[in-house]
Structure formats: structure tokens, C-alpha cells
Amino acid sequence: MAPRSITEEEKQTVQQLVARARIALKQIADYDQARVDRLIQAVGWALANEKTFTRLSNMGVDESGLGDRAGRPGKRFKLHGILRDALRARSMGIVEEDHAKGIVKYAKPVGVIASLVPVTNAGHTEVGNGIYSLKCKNAIIFAPHPAARKTSQECVRLMREAVRKLGCPEDVFQIIEKPSIPLAQELMAQCDLTIATGGQQMVRAAYSSGKPAYGVGAGNATMVIDETADIEIAARNTRISKTSDNGSGCSADGNLIVDARIYDRFLEALQKEGGYLVSPAEKVLLEKAMWDAERHRTSATIARPAAVIAEIAGFKIGADKGFLIVPETHIGKDYPFSSEKLSPVLSIIKYDGGFDEALKKVEQIYEVGGRGHSCGIYSHDDGHIHRLALLAPVSRMMVRQPQSKANAGAWDNGMPMTSSMGCGIWGGNITNENVNVKHYMQLTWVSRPIPEDRPSEQELFGEFYNSETP
């Protein structure tokens, strides 16, 4: 069903928000780097201290009914990482120089940014995007998901309070109080840039708004576990990734492709980590519970605990079981367990024809869904790692790491910390990168003359130089 048209009153509401944001932009235009950095530190502390972030995380879970009260507060480290990356970057004046090419780059603000907040990340996305936005002297207006509206409002209230105490205009952070799809669409049309983190419907709307947008694609993270893997570490990391916030993240492990030589031992290790091995009969029940007749995911089984999903399906699991393991022998559109599951449910697929077969299965899975997002591998064979990296149609690939804790940046990898992950042309996005501070600024390239860099025609045309013209 198409969304209703926006009312004149709603259009005026958005116009007023954007007008206030543009006034704030003028008021902070002369802030220097030190002042901006102090402001983002204040915002970081106000929202990412343990007590406040835990309260906001639990508020988001309680309000939406999605996610895990015990696990979601663990996302706090991402905000610490975002603040680390922001503080280490320059965001105004000269930000890059290449003397050999005579190029100097100057950073400028984007302007007014629209930020779509996903229901599964309320209380987190606002802070991360807000820090990056203010770092580059932008103003940002959040369009929350209706199911987590109060959480987003409380988050933005605290952000406004933090900057107001330091004499910064609080309208650098604003929020749509009564969110709707028409309001979000109007906001995107009036702002200068959209950061679209959320469902595919809103991401597509962002790209059709007539304004630039950074969007994200759907996940279906697939992990290859080859014969050289450390089985216990791979199983532990799978559990960490799959159970984080009830598997609601697009980076959570969805499919495991396991070498037949270690398959049984790995399956045993997963069960020791709290995985419940679904029987063939339970698999049939689970599929009916998780997908409707049109193969759409059922909302009652998204980001819910494994025990709740099992109960909805019609079977019970022990209290010590945190995720469901579904053995699968087929991959394709008609086999939904090879698609994104957004829950603590994962499929496990055996390969016994060597690494070529593992790569073939990876290709098949990304034809089902998740192209552009991510994959991973547990291997100590650099040749296998290289071959997967060459083949996989993804923007990021984690090696021997818990996928959902590593994709968006971690203390022990070099990925930029973020709340939004671009999926490139594969995923219908304009960038493959983790959306970070550089995406919140514009650059002016200043070019000075350099010694002529002009190759000879013989160098340019190589063996074809002076050959007969076709």
C-alpha cells in the first residue's frame, strides 16, 4: 500500500525544522576545531556513559519489543570508537595535502542532514551520526522509527542539552516529534544530504528524494569455516555475533559454510556454545513461523530470543540455548534459510568438494540476498582468504572475527567505526565504505602547477605504437 500524501501542516513542520537548522549553521560557522572537538566530547560523555547508554538501550528494547536488554548496552563501545575516529580527524580548513601532485583539500560543511533511525538501533544511531555531523559543523534532523519514537526523542533531548550547556545552539540536533513516512520523505527532500540507515523501503525513498543520500543494503552475512580453522574460536565468535541483540543486526552471522572434515566437530562446538540443533521436523515448523506464504519475514520472530521463536514455531528449547542451528542442504530463493534472518537463527551448510565448492556456495547465497554487505572466514590459509576476497560480492570481509562486532569497526581491527555501512553498487548504494566522518563533509580541491607529467606516446601505447592503424 502506497504511503499517504503529506499534509500542508506536516510540510510546514519540516520547513520550520530545516529553517531552524540553517540558523544554527550560521551560528556555528566560525567555530574552530578545538571548540567543535570539545562539543563532540560533551555529547559523547552525555550519551555514551555507561549509566545513560544502558538506560537508553533498555528503553529502546522495551518500547519496540525488539532486541535484548542484556546485550544491547554492549554497543556502547561503537560510540566510543566513533568519538575516537572523529577526534583524530580534521574537519575544517586544510585536511589533506599531496605536494607531489600540488593538491590541497579544504573541508566544508554539508549543511542540513536528514538521518533515518532504524527501530533496532534507537539511542545509538542518533549519537553516532550526531557526533560525525557536528564534527563537520553541520546540523542534523532525525526521523525516528515510530516504534522507537520515545527513545529517539530522549536521546536527542540529551544531545541538545549537552551542547546548550557549552553555548552551542541546540538546533544543531533536532527530531521529528510525530514520525511518519510522508514526514520522513519530505525531510529528505528539503535537507542537503540523507544518511539512510533502516529498512529498504526508506533507503529507496532516500535515493528518490532528489537529494544526495548515503544508504545501506540488506545483510546476509555468510561465514566460511575451512579445515584450518580454530574450531573453538570460530564457534565462540559465532555465538557472540549471532546472539548480540537477538541477532537483529544486519552483520549477524546468517549462514555458515563448513568443510566436511571439521563439520561434526564444529557442530558440536556450536552446541557447547549454547546453540540448539534443530531437527528436520522442527525445521519445517520454524520455516512456517518465520516466513509467511509470500516469503516475507514475520514480525513476531524478528529480533526475538531463540526460546520465543521456538515457542512460536511449536517446540521448546532449554533455557541455556541462545541460538538455533538449522542444517541446510539447499541454497536458493525457494529455501528461505539461506536468506537474511534478523534473529538468533543461522543455517549451517556442509561442503565436501574442496574450497572451490565453498566458493560456489558463497556465490549461490549472495544470489539469494545480501550482495554488497559482508562475509567472513575462519581460516589460517592465506590462499583461501585471498580467493574468497577476490570472489565475494561484498564490501567488507572479516577474517577470524565475530562478524557483528567487527564489521562496523572494533578496537582490534582498522575498520572505521560507524552506525551505517554502505554496500556499494551490489547493494544499490553509492559507497562501499563504513560511513564515517569524511562522508559528513565536502571538499574543495586546490590545484597548484607542478612539473609536467606527460608520458611519451610510445610509453602510452606500448607495443601498439606505430603499428598499422586498423
Image (cartoon, grey):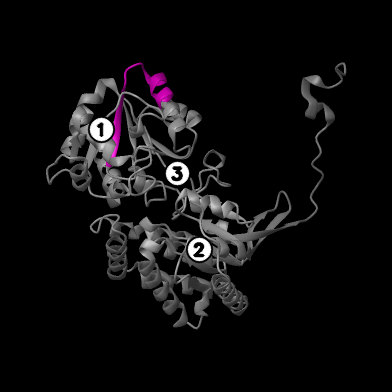
Residue 381 sits above or below residue 315 on the image? above
Residue at image point 40% right, 39% down: 220
The reply to whether residue 378 is in sight is no
Residue under numbered circle 2: 132
Q: Which mark is residue 296?
A: none
Real-space Cα distance between discs 3 and 1? 21 Å
* Camera-side mark, 2 or 1: 1
For mark 2, does the 10 Å Cα neighbourhood hold few (<14), some (14 to 19), or many (20 or more) residues? many
First in sequence, mark 2 or 1: give its number.
2
Q: Position of residue 233 (x, y in %)?
A: 25, 37
Above or below residue 103? Residue 400 is above
SS at mark 1 in the image: strand
Distance from label 3 to label 2 (Cα)?
A: 23 Å
Residue at 29% x, 54% y: name it.
Answer: 67
Q: Earlier in the sequence, mark 3 or mark 2?
A: 2
Please give left or right for residue 453 compared with residue 116 in the image: right
Residue 358 among those drawn in magenta: yes
At 50% from the left and 34% from the top, the residue drawn is 393
- N-term-proximal mark, 3 vs 1: 3
